[in-house]
Amino acid sequence: MSQSLSAQAVTERALELSRADDCMVLVTETSTANLRWANNSLTTNGVTRSRSVTVISLVTDSAGVRVGSVTRSGLRDDQLEELVRASEEAARGAAPAEGAHPLPDPGSAGRSTCAWDAPVPASDIGVFSDFAPELGKAFQRSVQAGVRLYGYAQHSLSATFLGSSTGLRLRHDQPSGSLDLNAKSEGPHHSTWVGQATRDFTDVDVAALEAELERRIAWARTTVELPAGRYETLLPPAAVADLMTDLYWGLGARDAFEGRTAFSSPRGGTRVGERLSPLPLRLRSDPAEPGLECAPFVLADAPGRRISAFDNGRPVGATEWISDGELARLVQTYDSATLTALPLTPEADNLVLELPGATASLDDMVAATERGLLLTCLWYIRMVDPRTMLLTGLTRDGVYLVEDGEVRGAVNNFRFNESPVSLLERVSEVGRTTPTFSREFGEYFPRTAMPPVRVPDFNMSSVSQAS
């Protein structure tokens, strides 16, 4: 038997087949179109379609609620019952789940963003109909300029259906797109990068991105060797997104309450209410944020400490995680909110950092710099100490020396050691927030808006020989 059932029908059929005490079904249909290019020429393009089905079975006995979650891709219609039985078998063999509680019903759940029965939209190569010709023009100009362009563009449309034995029927359709554009110059060799997130590629200005790459390559005609040390450093929005995404992922309430993170109070409990920055910074999420729209209800494929399938369908609203420089909220499940006696504020799939009233652009901040570094790209970011959120990583594709308000040349790469929590305490200037794309995490978390920031003493711990 082929895969002929619709995603909606698969959801209903899996729930009908379930013999568990409770059951949740998540069906996600995704279509993706992509372009890849190298050395000023398109190399590949493609379109893919996929469906994943997750069945979460809950079995209750005297010890508690046992949960089994099994996901399959490429599932044929006649394999659906096998998947449901596998989920039930996994539940019966599992230990009682931590934080189990009754599942949400339609009265306590969020709202769909589109009609349950509407056709599933699909992305195709046509999404690049305006972008690709502009990219071709950029290739021609780059050949003449002795620059080679490399990169990747991807667009996807995902429709996720959530059904439960408590009567939930929720759906969210999510468009996502991203562009990585890398330029390499010949003699002297220099590599630089820009990226952008987009919902449909109609807002991608290839000429403007190319102009930014050309500007950075021109800066690199002069090279400067600098030792490791602490430098006044300007971080553009993309690099700030790299660091704030890590901070956001570290905002789990249960881990903080149990003393495991930088948001744990040494006196016990959490640091909610404590000042994190002398500036009135605001870090927030909102599923309705214009241009960064995301699912307004919880979607999770398993129980967890930061996001839990027990909360599937619960509303996700606008939340200020940091408000006026103070830690205001933590990412909560229903269970952790009960444990910490703090409001239930589930994770949202976007993030905005802003300083109300800030208007400076990155160029304005460069012009106001006596001597410092412009650090355009971070890479290979890894956690060193979760208790302080100390991170390590490398600079890549563009570190520049700024003197007397102008960029003087390209600097060697560094390994850095920094904590985004500590950076919030030390940031001395914040500019205007704009949509941006994290080089390190944008593939998984593309919906961010960040400002450029000035840090007086960013820690470049050692010189890197990478180039």
Image (cartoon, rainbow, N blue to C red):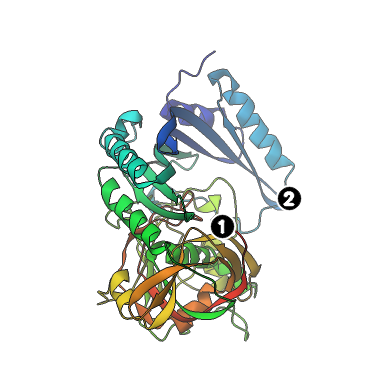
Location of residue 119 (image quadrant): top left
Q: Residue furthest front?
A: 187
As rendered, which of 362 and 335 lies closer to the eye? 362
- Where disc 2 sits, the SS reads loop
Lower position in the chain sequence, tag 2 or tag 1:
2
Residue 67: mark in rendering: none
Which residue is at the front of the view, 447 or 150?
A: 150
Q: Is residue 393 above or below residue 455?
A: above
Query: Residue 390 placed where, x, y %?
Result: 60, 73
| Quadrant assignment for the N terminus | top right
For label 2, the crowd category at 10 Å Cα-Cα, with few meaning under 14, some 14 to 19 and many 20 or more, is some
Indicate the position of residue 442 as horizontal and vertical percent values: 46, 53
Residue 327 visible at all: no
Q: For residue 152, which quarter of the picture?
A: top left
Element at label 1: loop
Q: Position of residue 101 (x, y in %)?
A: 57, 55
At x 60%, y 25%, the residue is: 81
CA separation in Å, label 2 and label 1: 49 Å
Task: Report the residue at 41% width, 44% height from top.
Answer: 149
Mark 2 and 1 residues: CB-CB less than 8 Å, in contact?
A: no
Name the residue carrying label 1.
467
Q: Disc 2 designates what residue? A: 95
Residue at the image point whose x is 38% and y is 44% from the top: 176
The residue at the far top in this view is: 1
166 relative position to 294: left or right: right
**Badge 1 amino acid:** Ser
